[in-house]
């Protein structure tokens, strides 16, 4: 950990707003940490599909995110950040079914290296564990001759690592949260795929500083097409929109000025299918129309392999 800190509470809140709200799961956080753990922008490809019954798959997520903070008016107060994050995940689909729905469960760990440069306000960096996520039970089912796929289920996030309330950068949000998501995937032909994920997250208070982030919802989307004779290559686009619709609080009191994050991001997506069940996904998201959050570029590499 490398620190040369400015101690202003408002500056730390701005740092938090930018670096956390990108995709929430991967965190750079300051004194106030109201932003979430759910990964808006991650589930862009076959989002409603789980491993076949009785099998387990490994999912890997990595992200490099670099940008600037924007305040509620969309202005830049002079804070820059970089985040590199890794998140390995295991998902198992059970042999049993429930009223025709397939049952799946999962677990994910996340770790982050974060760097913040606030100019005269100071510099800070941190690396370590972010959280452990439990996916207790997903229900999935396919309809219309297996062209429409549906998934729904909760996620429970437990904080990991240590949170320093006086730091500009923390590798963890410092709070637990619960999210609920619904996903659908449309596969009208073997060459086309489109996915949509809707999620809402409710956050607990950060015990280290009394900060509690407001409730946020978001939509993640993606579309892919296999245009070549070699159908291992899948070209498309993806992105996300997230919006916080209740105010952040500190010590149970709402923060004046309606501290809420909202943003939109979109960019190209490229998938390479190693086998019908194993793939590598790369995608780039450019953020825009950002308020009270980070405005930057997100570079993703994701993968899935059956075990």
Image: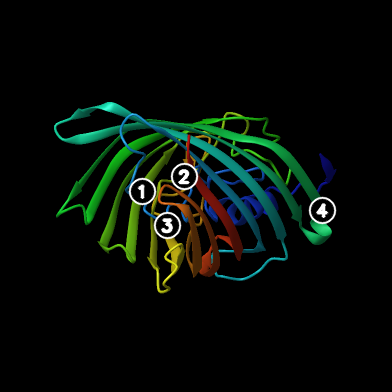
Q: Is residue 28 visible?
A: no
Q: Is residue 139 left or right of residue 230?
A: left
Q: Say whether marks 2 and 3 touch (CB < 8 Å).
A: no
Frontmost residue, 13 versus 85? 85
User: How is this picture coloured?
Assistant: rainbow
Query: Of helix, strand and loop, which one carries label 4?
Result: loop
Q: Residue at x 31, y 38 (%)?
A: 153
- Position above or below: 287 against 242: below
N-terminal of the two: label 4 or label 3? Answer: 3
Residue picked out by circle 2: 38
Bin the neighbour count of mark 4 within 10 Å (Cα to Cα): few under 14, some 14-19, many 20 and up.
some
CA gap between label 2 and label 3 equals 14 Å
Q: What is the secondary structure assignment of the residue under circle 1?
A: strand
2 or 1: tag closer to the N-terminus = 2
**Left or right position of 150 against 248:** left
Q: Secondary structure at mark 3?
A: loop
- Label at residue 199: 1
Please tell me which of labels 2 and 4 falls first in the chain: 2
The answer, for residue 179, to whether it is visible in the render is: yes
């Amino acid at each position: 950990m490398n620190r040369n800190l400015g101690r202003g509470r408002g500056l730390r809140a701005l740092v938090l707003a930018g670096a956390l709200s990108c995709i929430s799961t991967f965190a750079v956080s300051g004194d106030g940490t109201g932003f979430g753990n759910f990964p808006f922008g991650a589930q862009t490809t076959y989002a409603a599909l789980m491993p076949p019954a009785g099998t387990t798959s490994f999912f890997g997520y990595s992200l490099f995110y670099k940008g600037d903070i924007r305040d509620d008016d969309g202005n830049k107060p002079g804070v820059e950040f970089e985040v590199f994050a890794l998140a390995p995940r295991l998902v198992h689909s059970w042999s049993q079914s429930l009223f025709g729905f397939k049952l799946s469960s999962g677990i994910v760990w996340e770790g982050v290296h974060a760097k913040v440069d606030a100019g005269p306000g100071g510099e800070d960096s941190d690396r370590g564990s972010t959280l452990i996520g439990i996916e207790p039970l997903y229900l999935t089912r396919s309809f219309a001759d297996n062209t429409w796929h549906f998934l729904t289920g909760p996620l429970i996030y437990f904080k990991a690592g240590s949170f320093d309330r006086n730091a500009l950068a923390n590798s963890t949000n410092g709070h637990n949260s619960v999210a609920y998501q619904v996903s659908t995937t449309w596969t009208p032909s073997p060459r086309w795929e489109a996915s949509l994920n809707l999620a809402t997250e409710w956050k607990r208070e950060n015990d280290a500083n009394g900060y509690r982030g407001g409730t946020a919802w978001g939509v993640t989307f993606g579309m892919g097409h296999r245009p070549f004779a070699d159908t291992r290559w899948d070209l498309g686009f993806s992105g996300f929109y997230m919006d916080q619709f209740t105010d952040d609080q500190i010590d149970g009191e709402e923060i004046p000025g309606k501290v809420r994050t909202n943003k939109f991001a979109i960019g190209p997506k490229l998938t390479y299918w190693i086998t019908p069940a194993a793939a590598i996904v790369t995608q780039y998201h450019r953020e825009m129309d950002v308020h009270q959050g980070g405005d930057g570029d997100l570079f993703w590499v994701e993968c899935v392999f059956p075990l």
